[in-house]
Amino acid sequence: MMRWLLRPLDRYVMGEWTKIFLSTSLGFPLIVTIFDLTDNIDKYLNRNLTTKAIALSYLYWIPDSMFMALPAAVLFATVFSIGAFTRHAEITAAKASGISFHRLTLPIFAGAIVAAVLALGLGEMAPTTNKRRSDLLQETKFTSGNERFNFTYAAEFGRVYKASLLNVERASMEGVEVERKGREGSRDYFTYLITANEGVYSAGGWSLRNGTLHVVPAPGHDVVFRFDSLQDRHMTETPVRLMASSKAPSDMGYKELGRYIAALERSGSDVNVLRVDRALKIALPVTCFIIALFGAPLATSNQRGGAAYGIGLSLGTTVIFLIMIQLTKAVGGKGMFSPEAAAWIPNAVFGVLGLIMLLRVRT
């Protein structure tokens, strides 16, 4: 079944592709890190951050930066490896030996699938490492401002906070809502909603006053409790932390983002853009395979272009793809298409073009 992986030619093709893929997938984050450090080093030093904390923050940033770089790394590796095979007549020699172009590129497509799985893992790991990075850089500590109005905050354990007013100086909130979506069918993890007129923060956390607790043990059931004072042991975020902007989609995993979207939908908020972002968490990793499907036949179109041609082709394709993602986010966000469908439009376009070009390649 896997005999083709043992052939010398397959190992050679996979080896050449892997060398370029690894250097590119690690090189892009390194370049981004250098630019980011150059722009922010003064800010970090003014916060009296240690060299160790700054270095660790960039180490924790690797999953997030690599997640975005992997499709481009697959494209670079595919274009440069196949381009080199074409220029050195290795593809011609393979065809003369009875090996078709489609068969020759199978190891590359296998590598692209591995890259897609890696991207899925990095996408789920990035929210945790991003949070750790934010803590190391003390981002919430240096958030400016003293008040925040009509905001929603995605907390841990699938909880969502809403408040009409947060005042850091008084360590208080007004018009507070705390919502947690339970597990369907679970007897010990119910959905509940807390509404309170006021919340006051102390060292032990937030104390909510004059409110109502709604417990929903099953669909269609609602148990209501009135309270004068209630303290939720999970609501430990400081007022300064709540002043920070709510989590970005990149700071939430697929399931957590889904719970956040559901909570916002129940409050009547427009969540189309967030739904596109959630779909992209799956669509972008799949792009690793789609972009290989598109890049493989494209790399054979010029036999003498050299490195400059490969770089220009890869960068041009990457820019076009990124532009398409932004356009589809705008289209999906406005509701002109289903947000989930909009997220897959770039993959669909490049996938169809890639299949057409792959079928037209001389084998």
Image (spheres, rainbow, N blue to C red):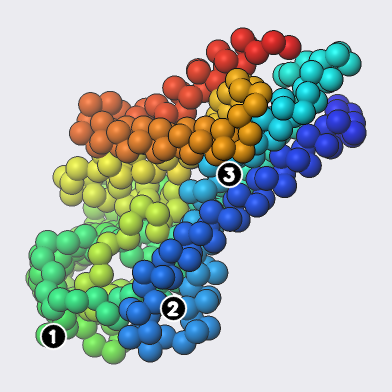
- Label 1 and label 2: CA atoms lie apart by 24 Å
Q: Name the residue under label 2.
A: 136
| Badge 3 element | helix
Which amino acid type is shown beneath numbered disc 3? Ala
> Where in the figure is residue 88, as x and y percent of width and height?
77, 28
Of tags 1 and 2, which is closer to the observer? Answer: 2
**Which quadrant of the figure contains the C terminus?**
top right
* Residue in the picture at 39% in, 43% down: 278
Mark 3 or mark 1, whichever is nearer to me:
3
Q: In which quarter of the image is residue 180?
A: bottom left
> At 86% from the left edge and 31% from the top edge, which residue is drawn?
9
Front-most of residues 37 and 109: 37
Instruction: Tell me where residue 299 appears, x and y as whole percent.
Output: 61, 26
- In terms of sequence position, does the residue under pointer 2 or pointer 3 come before the other? 3
Residue underneath mark 3: 73
Q: In this view, does 220 lie above or below 134?
A: above
Give the position of the N terminus as an image quadrant.
Answer: top right
Secondary structure at badge 2 equals helix
**Mark 2 neighbour class, 10 Å CA radius: few under 14, some 14 to 19, many 20 or more:** some
